Image (spheres, rainbow, N blue to C red):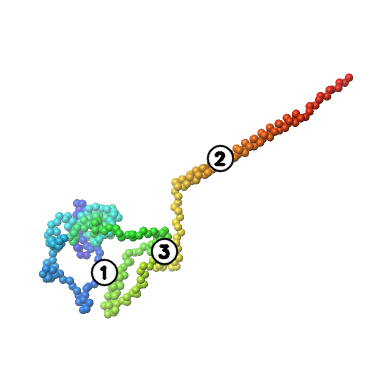
Amino acid sequence: MRSIWNGAISFGLVSIPIKLVNATESRSVSFRQIHTEDGGRIRYRKVCELDGEEISQAEIGKAYEDADGTMIPITDEDLAALPLPTAKTIEIVSFVPAGEIDPLQMDNAYYLQPSGVPAAKPYTLLREALKRSDRVAVAKFALRGRERLGMLRVVDDVIAMHGLLWPDEIRSPEGVAPETPVAVREAELDLADALMATLGEVDINTLHDDYREAVEQMIAAKAEGGAGLAPPEPEAAGGGQVIDLMAALESSVRAAKEARGEGEVAEVTELAPRKAAARTPKETGTRKSTAKTAAKKTAAPARKSTAKTAAKKTAAKKTATATAKTAAKTTAKTAAKKQPAKKATPRKRTA
């Protein structure tokens, strides 16, 4: 692979000579612009707008356009004279967990290749240190006339570097989220979980560009003198149609299972509401004590009223018994007064 940049990795006092190699390539089909009447190629020419003459690449330089339209020429010597320590150095500034890097910052990817035999030892040292620490290196480097941010990580036995956007280059997502508040039911979440579980995992290496394959087939058919591929039938427009989310989720789960060859698919219905969460021991104890307190409060008045009623009944019985005894005594005395006294019979003396 052809290198696009030569320099060194600055790792403390360690310097590792490296070459920068593109880690990715575009496989998309590219087209040329032509004149539709005769098929002639359309080309762009670089023309000076002052004299109208076509200019060669060697005569083209750089300039900065000021706010008022004034062009300020900038030469390669001007850029080389800048006090930029990262002009030929990838300067590592810190080591952080990979999770701290926002994927939105990811840019182009490169492989860092050791340059020469002396670079093999320090290159291997940095690679193994990154592996063992389970961290990535954040670095600054200059490429194509501007300083950039990079992230170094290990891919197999190679150190790879991802260009990162500067934090102020990431736009805020303000105004992107739905403005209307939406409530999502538990049953809908359960069906979404079921759909994700049904789709399962996929080997990303098996995925490919279907559109590119279709374009290549169309080009091959036209190259052989054919008319190309038949256009697909247009789908019925459903603009403004309200979607039944539950039905769509159920159909998606069913279709995913059929695609995975799971045979007959059972009807998916709304799941029962989830059981209440188990009560903690503290909550159980609190509720029991509350119930006992309420029972005591309820039973206390009942016991008092029962005791009062029993006391009243006992007092009534005692009163009745005392009244009966008094009446009996009075009756006996009255009867004794009415009965006449018996006279004493004189005893006869025997001669």
Relative to residue 238, is residue 132 drawn left or right?
left
Mark 2 to mark 1: distance in Å? 93 Å
Residue that numbered label 2 is attached to:
304
| Towards the viewer: 298 or 129 | 298
For the question of whether residue 6 can be seen, the reply is no
- Name the kind of residue labelled 1 in the image: Ser
The residue under the point 19% across, 58% down is 147
In the figure, residue 216 lies in which quadrant?
A: bottom left
Relative to residue 255, is residue 87 drawn left or right?
left
| Towards the viewer: 37 or 212 | 37
Q: Which mark is residue 99?
A: none
Mark 2 to mark 3: distance in Å? 61 Å
Rendered location of residue 313, percent (x, y): 62, 38
Quadrant (top left, top right, bottom left, bottom right) of the N terminus? bottom left
- Kindly report which numbered mark, 2 or 1, lies closer to the viewer in this rendering: 2
Q: Which mark is residue 28?
A: 1
Rendered location of residue 128, percent (x, y): 26, 55
Find numbered disc 2 in the image and state the secondary structure of the residue it sits on. Answer: helix
In the figure, residue 64 lies in which quadrant?
A: bottom left
The residue under the point 34% across, 74% down is 234
Find numbered disc 3 in the image and state the secondary structure of the residue it sits on. Answer: helix
In the figure, residue 224 lies in which quadrant?
A: bottom left
Residue that numbered label 3 is attached to:
246
- Which residue is most to the right? 351
Mark sitting earlier along the chain (2/3): 3
For the question of whether residue 79 can be seen, the reply is yes
- Name the kind of residue labelled 3 in the image: Met
